[in-house]
Amino acid sequence: MNSKTANLGATIDNNRISGYQIMVLVLCFLVVLVDGFDTAVIGYIAPALRQEWGLQPAQLSPAFGAGLFGLMVGAFIFGPLADAYGRKKVLLVSVLIFSLGTLASAYSTSIDMLTALRFLTGIGLGGAMPTCITLSAEYSPARRRMIMVTLSYSGFTTGLALGGAVASQIIPVFGWRGVLMIGGIVPLLLLPLLAWLLPESVRFMAAHPQHADALRKVMGRITGRNDLHDVTFIEPQSPVAVRSPISQLFIENRALRTVLLWGTFFCSLFVFYLLTSWLPSILKDAGYDIAAAARIGAMVPLGGTVGAILMALLMDRVSPYRVLGLAYLGSALVIALIGFVLADAFWLGLTVFMVGFGVAGAQNGLNLLSASIYPTAARATGVSWAMANGRVGSIIGSVLGAWLIAQLGQPSVFFVVLAIPALFGSIAIFSLQRMTEKKRGPEVTVLPT
């Protein structure tokens, strides 16, 4: 590296993966894990809430919807803030908010109080996830980005599954408040570690000259070199941020891709959150006890963890659009089967696992696509706004859950109807593939260091 300037992206891509990069991904994994735990905890404690407070399913809908509405608000707010002021600052604030919100929720004395605190918790959760995805993508070399970001994001589905496992053990002994206490204390303990070890985004630092010294130190740890004191890292391929991050989602032929991406997020999270929110309650009404309902419900995120990793490996070799489109199509077929195996715990658990494999596994691929199609100046905004639009689907799905259950009556009919949005997601992905391939530009070459 003899020049006084160096291509930031090429330097990361051409170097071996360092222990420093792995540390960043592990920290993001831990944040996403507690994010997933705190996101799903309301679904796992719902049967206990109904039992203690004498609630009907419809009375739980506001608590589900408030948390997810907070997620949407947080994603809309914190994405542009992360692009403007730095990913790390936004991430620390987000973790603090959802930690305190979850901890305070353990002291709720009514469903109205819990609903308000779930909204506050959701704001923090909505800011943490897209920021972690952005950081993971920016610290991963292109040749390993898919699998490395997938492993980092798998913390979310791991956290969801862990929530079911923890709930099944804690609720019978300590009640639902014990689960929320764990969900609030653990991320608070993680916060000092993040402040100490987690670096700022390399691409954010490259775009802001005042961070040049900090960037050189980070790149020294990535490359193992100590001769970078007079090197300026740049990204020649990146456009100058002359427009707002939001406007960049719709310029340079990105408008239709953005709309299709948002539509897929909507359908995917509609299905995912309706299942994770209401499946434990449906199973309890079908005769399963609270612990068994939590364990079977945990098969959705567990399947998602396995699906995310396998799909990432496939997406490195096959068109990611084809992998995701087929995943949603297969999920639609499997979802329709759930109501017909409800009485058999083994087949039910396997079917629910396969739904998680397809829907939650494919959701990871969507996150990666949203991080890859936007420029640095709008990347956090692109990821967070795509997820925010997905949150609209999650809110509608969670709130409509009780109404759909009541209106459709038979579980077999309910799950057949639930398969429809997954099918729409498949159609949107294949449409995105066709449009993207038709307008694909020339390949970007990686410059040597």
Image (spheres, rainbow, N blue to C red):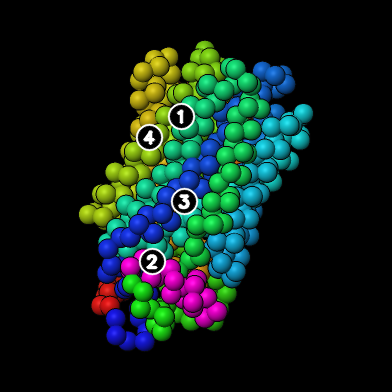
Which comes before the other along the chain, label 1 or label 4? 1
Pointer 1 residue: 298
Q: Is residue 213 covered in magenta? A: yes
- Circles 1, 4 touching at the beta carbon (< 8 Å): no
Pointer 2 residue: 221
In percent of width and height, residue 241 lies at 52, 79
Q: Read off the magenta span.
A: 203-224
Residue kind at label 3, given as amino acid type: Leu
The quarter of the rendered structure image containing the N terminus is: bottom left
Which comes before the other along the chain, label 3 or label 2? 3
Which comes before the other along the chain, label 3 or label 4? 3
- Circles 2, 1 touching at the beta carbon (< 8 Å): no
Q: CA distance from mark 3 to mark 1?
A: 23 Å
Which comes before the other along the chain, label 2 or label 1? 2
* Residue 237 visible to an observer of this rendering: no
Residue kind at label 2, given as amino acid type: Arg
